[in-house]
Image (spheres, helix red, strand yellow):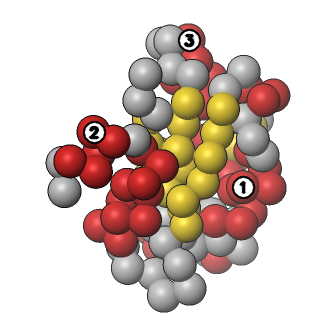
Amino acid sequence: MFPIAILAGGLATRLWPLTEAIPKALVDVNGEPFIAQQLRLLLTNGIERVLVCAGYLGEMIQKGVGDGARFGLHVAFAFDGPRLRGTAGAIKQAVPALGPAADQAE
């Protein structure tokens, strides 16, 4: 089964000043980070592998999520890089981790 990609690289400027210090994925929603809710929802829908395409403050997301074991998932990360290139850049970085079908879709 192919992994699901979560795009988590934006600056989330509409949520500033809240997201000035933390990425949108870690914003507290109903007592826990937003990404935790997303990961649990994916697990309940039969997903086992997740690739987080991270950019702005992505290391914080990686630290909070880890390898995904506590969510019952296998979570990997693809980082946009030091110069943020936006959604297309994050997806381009993620293609090798998404599997052979993703390589053919380019």
Numbered badge on residue 81: none
* Figure quadrant of the C terminus: bottom left
Vertical placement of residue 57 versus 38, above or below: below
Q: Give the crowd class for mark 3: few <14, some 14-19, many >=20 residues within 10 Å.
A: few
Name the front one of labels 2 and 1.
2
Q: Give the crowd class for mark 1: few <14, some 14-19, many >=20 residues within 10 Å.
A: some
Q: Earlier in the sequence, mark 2 or mark 1?
A: 1
Q: Give the crowd class for mark 2: few <14, some 14-19, many >=20 residues within 10 Å.
A: few
Q: Examine the image and state in which quarter residue 75 appears.
A: top right
Q: Amino acid at mark 1?
A: Gln
* Figure quadrant of the N terminus: top left
Residue pictured at 72% horizontal, 21% vertical: 72
The residue nearer to you, when weighing 82 against 18, is 82
Residue holding disc 2 = 101
The spot of residue 15 in percent (x, y) is 52, 65
> Contact (CB < 8 A) between labels 2 and 1?
no
Q: In this view of the protein, can residue 101 be seen by the observer?
A: yes
3D distance between C-alphas at marks 2 and 3:
24 Å
3D distance between C-alphas at marks 3 and 1:
21 Å
The spot of residue 11 in percent (x, y) is 49, 72
Numbered badge on residue 44: 3
Q: Earlier in the sequence, mark 2 or mark 3?
A: 3
The spot of residue 42 in percent (x, y) is 52, 23
Residue holding disc 1 = 62
Q: Earlier in the sequence, mark 3 or mark 1?
A: 3
Q: Amino acid at mark 2?
A: Ala
Tell me: 96 left or right of 76: left
